[in-house]
Image: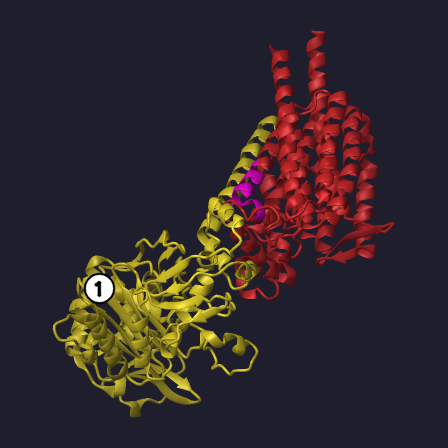
Chain colours: A yellow, B red
Amino acid sequence: MNTRNLIKTLLALFLCMFIILSSYLVYIVGKNGSRWFSSPYNIRIRTQKSNVVAGSILDRNGIVLAYSDADNMRQYNSDRSLRLSVAHIVGDNFGQTLGAEALYAKHLLGFDKDVFEMIKNADSSKSPMGNDCVLTIDAELCKYAYNQLDGRDGAIIVMNYKTGEILVSTSSPNFDPKKVEKYIAKELELQDGAMINRTTSGQYVPGSVFKIVTTVAALRYIRGVENMEFECTGELLFDKKSGKLLGNSKEIDKDDLTEEYLTLIDFQGEEHGTVTLKEAFVKSCNSTFAKLALVIGSKNLYKTAKDLGIGREFLFSDIIAYSGSYTESNRDYNLAWSGVGQYKDIVTPISMCLLTGAIANGGVVMEPRLLKFVKTHEGGITYSATQKPSFTALSKSEASLLQEYMLEAVKDGTGRRAAIDGYNVGGKTGTAEVTLNGKNKSHAWFCSFLDSEEYPFSITVVVELGGSGGSVAAPIARNIFKKIISSQE
Amino acid sequence: MKTLNEIKMGFSANRLLIIIILFIMLGFCLLSFSQGRMDAEPFVFGSIVSALFIVVYLLMLAMFKEFDRPLFLTTIFLLGLGLLIQFRMSPKNAKSQLFMLGIGVVLMFLCMGTVKFNSSMRKLTIPIIIGSLAIMAALLVIGKESGGAKNWIIIGGRSFQPSEFVKIATAFVLAHYLDTRTKLLKLIVPLSFAIIIVFLLVVEKDLGAAMLIALTCLIMYFAATGNLGVTLAGLGMGALGAILSYRFFDHVKLRVEVWQNPWITYDSSGYQIVQGLMAIASGGLFGSGLGLGSAKVIPAYHTDYIFAVICEEFGIIAGVLLIAFYVVFIIRGLIIALNARNRFLMLFALGCTTLITLQSFIIIGGVIKLIPLTGITLPFISFGGSSMIASMISFGFLQGIAADSKKYRAEAEGST
């Protein structure tokens, strides 16, 4: 080719480069712009606060959670326990947390006004007014849920799995939005991590609730697993050096072992005997799921976890959420524990709640919504949430099978204490073992859904160091569901 | 028919120039009134800028009738926008920038004039090579560090960035040799010259300039020889060099990590990128309005990060338009190369255009986090005397080549 033609080729190349450049600019700002803008580091928000009367933040029933008073000071709801229960959701005025105050600053401070409004406002002598944000949460229910934690640390989240609306979100320990200035000045002590919203960012060991993931992986990678039977003796033995599975406690006599060994035991050493996959799920049998994990393999388990949301990058427009992570291991012992939600498995309450909701919703995860609508001071609506699917986690048939298992677990399994008369409740318990100051403790987990057209809600309860999921977390889920049903009747 | 076309073209160029000047003057008027009271200074400054543009345009018409109008108008717009945004950020900087532009304009005319004597100009190749190598090597010893890179030299109280001029010298040297030689073995002199320059730049940690010169040389080599294999091998060597420097140099590794996720190191290394992204996001589609942004918090807002400032105050839409203006520059630059009178001028025009192309791509891409950030100026807009003068020199050569080829063609047609 001669130089002339090559220059023409280069021209095409340069044009492509610049088309990519401008498309990327538009794409990336469209995708991340509001997130970047509402970053607590953005000094423009702070500047705007002194020029604008920020709008109010209200719950779905019109309860005012935050507002600006006549002196343009930020005020919060006067009911202390209500205020604390929604502290993480509402956030603070000093850019310390990622609550509505920061995330919806665009609306609250009126950055979303169009040119004509700005010209109109520039003319008047009064300070311009920001817009009011109405959230999807029910503050009274949040308060109720918060009181259910009864002073213990933990997180509770309730979502409508058909619309994605977050109805309840509360997290403890928390802070008082009224006193954030004092926390910053170190006049008041604050518990470590109290500013973190544990429902969306709390990184927890899942324990047995992770068996939902292992079950889906088993359905995907082990043909006919629904009809297989498994033998549970309550204990599995592994070689300490290689981490290889030696067998269960019946097949191997511990006294015969010359090498050192490791064990994987069932909850309180229970022996489940011969079980099917469904029975293993309902009874939350560790031995079975550990063995399943070994057959499924680390890579496939990782892939399934990601399909189900754990390890996925959550880029929701209304909230900032972390999804958790699954760590692969080629050591059998670790892989076995990872199949029952221990080892290095990490989830967040919201990722489990989305997954539970997807099971109830035929496999589809709806994008979580926290902002219901935005209205101007005069009452005009400037933004209204639309419901849309975020991703498909499971196939319809997988979802209905998991539904069946979870319903059974509440009807006649570890989740019995979540049952509500007259309603179909599905759930999975979890008792996640953690080591604290050298002692073994456990977080109580319960992931549950109401199988109801009228009340399409999924819930995730975590009570830190609370004990067993079935006896501690499940009753809390039941109480909250009951409260929702009675308050909407 | 042809003359009619040209008359029409000249007429619309006048009109477009007026529109550009109106746009710039409106911006300066806005700045005059932005404090709630009349401040004459921006208006006066804007008038001087406009007058300068008109004078340059008239001089061009008088001296080089056949200069390239679209390229001229695009550059005038970029220069005007640059001075406007610089004035809004800091009037002091803008004044110094205007002074540099004045020097740049003089050099531009000089460069335009020299194109006619390109065959005698090419005798300077060897001195240019020696001079470039000497100055780049001297930087190792007497260079002043700024922003992590040791690439400044101070002469008589003013600081210069020699790499800005060396890049044009490199394009010149390559064009000279590639004109007649295409075999790799016969190109040892220019290629080892380019490699040494790039190597020195890497040692001086001026990664932006190193990348720019390396890629420009490859592109010129490719266009001149059509040898895809060697070009890809060169690219591969560059990639290998990049991987090795990622492995062994902490500052390179840091840049890549910051590029992948600037938010986790917001307090330290990620600060600049995060501030830039927030500025762009805060502007939204239509921008905060001239004078209403807060982009001064970004480090290097007036040099490397000027694109983020423009995006914040004029909006994403202006960002896209600005990219489009560079595209017009590139298209005209390459058309000038295609129409050049001889092969040397063709390759040199290609080199000058490629420099502007890659430079704007590298810095805009870095600011919007498409590629890792390497500090380099946005041509015609960023604050910086060396960069401004060097850009004007490239522009001058392009205009000279355009005028020369049209004149030559007209003469050829006239004689037949």
Chain bearing mark 1: A
Quarter of the C terminus of chain A within the rendering: bottom left
Image coordinates for residue A430, horizontal then vertical, percent: 29, 78
Q: Would you say residue A55 sits in the magenta stretch?
A: no
Left or right of residue B405: residue A109: left
Image coordinates for residue B184, horizontal then vertical, percent: 68, 37
Quickly name the residue at label 1: A456
Q: Is residue B377 visible?
A: no
Is B347 above or below relative to B233?
A: above
* Quarter of the image where one finds residue B68: top right
Write the residue at 66% across / 36% down.
B25
Most foreground residue, B86 or B23: B23
The outermost residue toward the front is A125
Image coordinates for residue A29, horizontal then vertical, percent: 48, 50
Q: In this picture, which residue range is highlighted in magenta?
A: B313-324
Q: Would you say residue B315 sits in the magenta stretch?
A: yes
Q: Secondary structure at mark 1?
A: loop
Label 1 crowd bin: few (<14), some (14–19), many (20+), radius 10 Å: some
For badge 1, the amino acid type reads: Pro
* Quarter of the image where one finds residue A184: bottom right
Image coordinates for residue A255, horizontal then vertical, percent: 30, 92
Most foreground residue, A111 or A190: A111
Q: Is residue B92 visible?
A: yes
Most foreground residue, A396 or A106: A106
The outermost residue toward the right is B156
Most foreground residue, A340 or B143: B143
The outermost residue toward the top is B416
